Image (cartoon, rainbow, N blue to C red):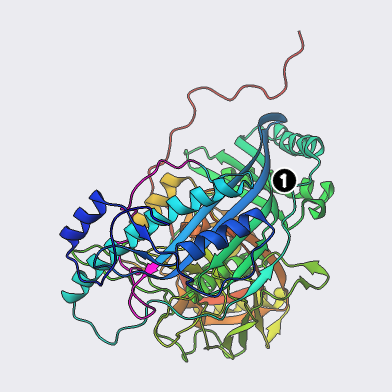
C-alpha cells in the first residue's frame, strides 16, 4: 500500500537532512510479513492491530532503516467515580476511554532509537487525532493505527540519527544492548463491562463524608470512590498477543486541619479491592473515616516536634510503608539515558544500583516478589497479575536472600548484569523504556519478637544512650496526600541529597516510663536504602499494605495517569540511628473569619 514517496536504502543521514526529509515527505509502506502473525482474530480490535502491524512491518524512508520492532498497546477502561464532602455530592461521572501506545524501534536490538534523553518527543507528523475510537469499527481502527504508526516511525528515525551523533561525541565503555529478545506469548483473556450499584455507592460515599460534620476542627475533607474495569490489548511484531484485564476499585478519604500556628495537618485513608463487590463493608470504612478525622484533630493540637537523632520504631502499617518506599522503589533498576549538553532527563538512579551480591538488610531478612500469588491468609492480594505490559509472563522472584541482594525488578531494557526481562514492566517509562514495579512484595524475617518487645527494646536503647525519649512512627504519608506545591518544595530541598522519603504523619515520642506523646511537623533527613542495614529487630506482626503505585514522587495520589496495583506484606521494624528535623516551610495564615456552622440553624 502506497502512502508516500520516499524509499529506504540505508542509514547515516545527518539530523539536518533528516529533519528536511521528515518535514517534506511522507512514508512508503512496503507490505511485507514482518513476523509470523497469528490467524486473523474475530475481535475487530485485535484483527485491526494484527493487520496494520503486518502492513506496517516494513516502513521505509530514503537512506533510513526500517523498523525492527513494532508494538501496539491499547489501554481501555470504563470508570465510575463519585465524590462527596460533608454529606453533599460534589461530582458524579461515568466514562470510557481507549489510549494507544505505539512503540516503533529502528536499528536493531543492540542499538536503536530509545534510551536517548532528547528522543522522547514526537517529532513526526501530527494528525490532530482525538481520543482513540471506542467503537470496534474495523476501518476506523485501522485508520487510527496507520496514522499513529506513521508519526511514531518518523519520530524514531529522527531520534536514532540524533542519538548516533550524540554517541560519537561521548566516551563509551562497554555498550549495553538497547532491547532484549523475548519469547512470543499468546495470552488473551476477556474484558468485562463495569457492573456497579451506582446509586448505592453514592449513598455510601455521602454518608461517609457526613462523618466529618461531627468534627468542626476539620478544615476540609473529601470522600471519593473510583471503580474501573478494563485492561490492555498488546500485539507486537515478535508474534506476542496479549489481552490482560485490569480491574480496581478504591475509596479514598482525605482530611485537613490547621494548628493554631497555621501549620496544615493532613491524613488520608484508602480502601482497595480488585472487585467493587468485594470492597470492605460499611462498618470497617466508618471506623477508618472516624479514625482519620480524630487523627487530624489530634495533630492540630499536638506540639511541634524537635530535632531528633536515634532509634526509630516503624510500627504496623508504617513498617510496610517505609519498606515499600525505601526498599521496594529501589529494587527497580533502570538505565541512565544517552545525553548531551547537560540534558539528563531528570534521571534518578536506584540507590541499590551496583550492589548486587552486597548485604542490604540484616541476615535474617528475605524479600520475594510474587505476582502469581492470588491470596494471603484467605485475603485476596492486590498486586497479582499474569502478564506485564511488554508481554512477558512473570514468575516469583527472590530479590533478597539472608540480607543479600540477589536480583532486581527488570523490563526488556537491558541493565548492567542483566540482559532480559523478568516480567516487571507495569508502568510506562521514559525514553522508550517501561518502568518496573513490584507486585506482591513479601518481606519476612526469620528472627522476630512481639511488637511489645520492640517497644521495650526501644526504651532500653534510649536509657543506655541517655536520651530523654525515642520515636515511634505509626503512619507515613505514602502514597502521599500532599499538594503538588508541597511535593515540589520537598524535592527542591533534597536536591543533591539523594532520593527523599515521604513525611511521617503519626509520630510519637516514647518516654522511658512508657508514656507516649503525639508530635507534628517532622521530616526524615538522610533516610535511604543504606539505612535498612541498621534494622535492629523485626516484629512478629505482618499484614498486607495495599496502594496504587505510580512514577510520581512519593506515589503522589492523583498525580499520574498510569498506576499499578501493589501490595507489601512486612513486619514492624526497629531502625537504629535515624534523624528527624522540624519542617521549615513558611506556615500559611489562619482563615480571616471562623468556619460557618456545619448544622443549619432552625428559623
**Percent of width and height locating residue 495:** 32, 61
Q: Label 1 crowding class (10 Å Cα cut-off): few <14, some 14-19, many 20+?
A: many
Q: Is residue 569 above or below residue 126?
A: below
Q: Nearer the viewer, residue 581 or 109?
A: 109
Dividing the picture into quadrants, the one containing residue 511 is bottom right
Q: Is residue 122 magenta?
A: yes
Q: In this view, does 305 lie above or below 525?
A: above
User: Which residue occupies the extreme top position in the image?
Assistant: 603
Dividing the picture into quadrants, the one containing residue 498 is bottom left
Q: Nearer the viewer, residue 146 or 232?
A: 146
Q: Who's the residue at 16% across and 58% down the image?
A: 16
Q: What stretch is highlighted in magenta?
A: 105-130
Q: Mark 1 sits on what residue?
A: 289
Looking at the image, can residue 475 be seen? Answer: no
Q: Does the magenta stretch include residue 7?
A: no
Q: Nearer the viewer, residue 157 or 373?
A: 157
Amino acid at each position: 500500500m502506497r502512502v508516500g514517496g520516499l524509499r529506504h536504502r540505508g542509514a547515516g543521514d545527518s539530523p539536518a537532512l533528516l529533519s528536511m526529509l521528515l518535514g517534506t515527505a511522507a512514508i512508503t509502506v512496503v507490505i511485507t510479513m514482518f513476523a509470523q502473525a497469528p490467524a486473523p482474530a474475530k475481535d475487530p480490535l485485535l484483527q485491526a492491530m494484527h493487520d496494520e502491524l503486518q502492513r506496517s512491518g516494513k516502513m521505509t524512508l530514503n537512506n533510513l532503516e526500517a523498523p525492527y520492532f513494532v508494538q501496539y498497546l491499547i489501554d481501555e477502561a470504563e470508570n465510575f467515580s463519585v465524590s462527596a464532602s460533608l454529606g453533599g455530592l460534589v461530582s458524579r461521572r461515568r466514562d470510557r476511554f481507549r489510549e494507544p501506545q505505539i512503540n516503533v524501534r529502528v536499528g536493531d536490538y543492540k542499538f536503536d532509537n530509545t534510551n536517548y534523553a532528547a528522543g522522547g518527543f514526537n517529532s513526526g507528523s501530527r494528525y490532530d487525532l482525538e481520543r482513540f475510537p471506542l467503537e470496534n469499527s474495523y476501518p476506523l481502527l485501522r485508520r487510527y493505527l496507520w496514522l499513529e504508526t506513521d508519526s511514531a516511525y518518523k519520530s524514531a528515525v529522527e531520534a536514532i540519527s540524533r542519538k548516533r551523533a550524540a554517541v560519537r561525541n561521548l566516551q563509551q565503555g562497554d555498550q549495553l544492548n538497547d532491547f532484549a529478545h523475548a519469547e512470543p506469548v499468546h495470552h488473551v483473556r476477556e474484558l468485562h463491562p463495569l457492573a456497579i450499584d451506582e446509586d448505592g455507592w453514592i449513598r455510601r460515599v455521602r454518608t461517609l463524608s457526613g462523618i466529618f460534620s461531627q468534627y468542626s476542627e476539620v478544615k476540609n475533607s473529601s470522600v471519593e470512590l473510583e471503580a474501573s474495569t478494563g485492561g490492555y490489548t498488546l500485539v507486537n511484531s515478535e508474534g506476542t498477543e496479549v489481552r490482560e484485564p485490569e480491574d480496581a476499585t478504591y475509596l479514598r478519604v482525605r482530611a485537613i486541619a490547621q494548628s493554631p500556628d497555621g501549620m496544615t495537618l493532613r491524613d488520608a485513608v484508602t480502601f482497595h479491592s480488585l472487585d467493587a463487590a468485594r470492597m470492605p463493608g460499611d462498618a470497617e470504612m466508618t471506623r477508618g473515616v472516624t479514625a482519620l478525622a480524630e487523627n487530624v484533630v489530634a495533630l492540630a493540637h499536638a506540639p511541634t516536634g524537635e530535632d531528633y537523632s536515634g532509634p526509630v520504631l516503624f510500627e504496623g502499617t508504617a513498617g510496610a510503608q517505609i519498606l515499600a518506599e525505601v526498599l521496594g522503589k529501589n529494587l527497580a533498576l533502570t538505565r541512565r539515558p544517552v545525553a548531551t549538553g547537560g540534558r539528563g532527563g531528570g534521571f534518578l538512579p536506584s540507590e541499590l544500583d551496583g550492589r548486587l551480591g552486597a548485604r542490604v538488610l540484616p541476615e535474617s531478612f528475605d524479600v520475594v516478589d510474587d505476582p502469581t500469588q492470588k491470596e494471603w491468609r484467605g485475603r485476596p492480594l492486590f498486586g497479582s497479575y499474569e502478564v506485564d505490559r511488554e508481554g512477558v509472563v512473570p514468575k516469583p522472584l527472590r530479590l533478597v536472600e539472608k540480607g543479600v541482594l540477589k536480583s532486581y525488578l527488570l523490563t526488556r531494557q537491558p541493565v548492567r548484569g542483566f540482559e532480559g526481562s523478568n516480567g516487571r514492566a507495569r508502568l510506562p517509562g521514559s525514553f522508550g523504556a517501561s518502568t518496573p514495579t513490584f507486585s506482591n512484595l513479601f518481606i519476612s524475617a526469620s528472627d522476630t519478637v512481639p511488637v511489645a518487645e520492640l517497644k521495650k527494646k526501644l526504651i532500653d536503647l534510649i536509657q543506655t544512650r541517655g536520651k530523654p525519649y525515642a520515636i515511634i512512627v505509626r503512619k507515613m504519608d505514602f502514597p502521599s496526600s500532599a499538594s503538588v506545591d508541597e511535593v515540589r518544595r520537598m524535592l527542591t530541598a533534597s536536591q543533591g541529597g539523594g532520593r527523599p522519603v515521604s513525611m511521617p504523619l503519626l509520630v510519637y515520642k516514647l518516654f522511658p516510663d512508657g508514656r507516649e506523646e503525639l508530635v507534628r511537623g517532622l521530616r526524615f533527613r538522610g533516610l535511604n536504602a543504606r539505612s535498612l542495614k541498621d534494622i535492629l529487630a523485626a516484629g512478629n506482626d505482618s499484614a498486607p499494605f495495599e496502594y496504587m503505585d505510580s512514577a510520581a514522587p512519593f506515589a503522589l495520589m492523583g498525580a499520574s495517569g498510569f498506576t499499578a496495583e501493589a501490595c507489601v506484606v512486612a513486619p514492624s521494624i526497629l531502625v537504629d540511628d535515624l534523624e528527624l528535623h522540624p519542617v521549615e516551610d513558611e506556615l500559611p495564615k489562619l482563615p480571616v473569619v471562623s468556619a460557618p456552622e456545619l448544622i443549619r440553624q432552625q428559623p
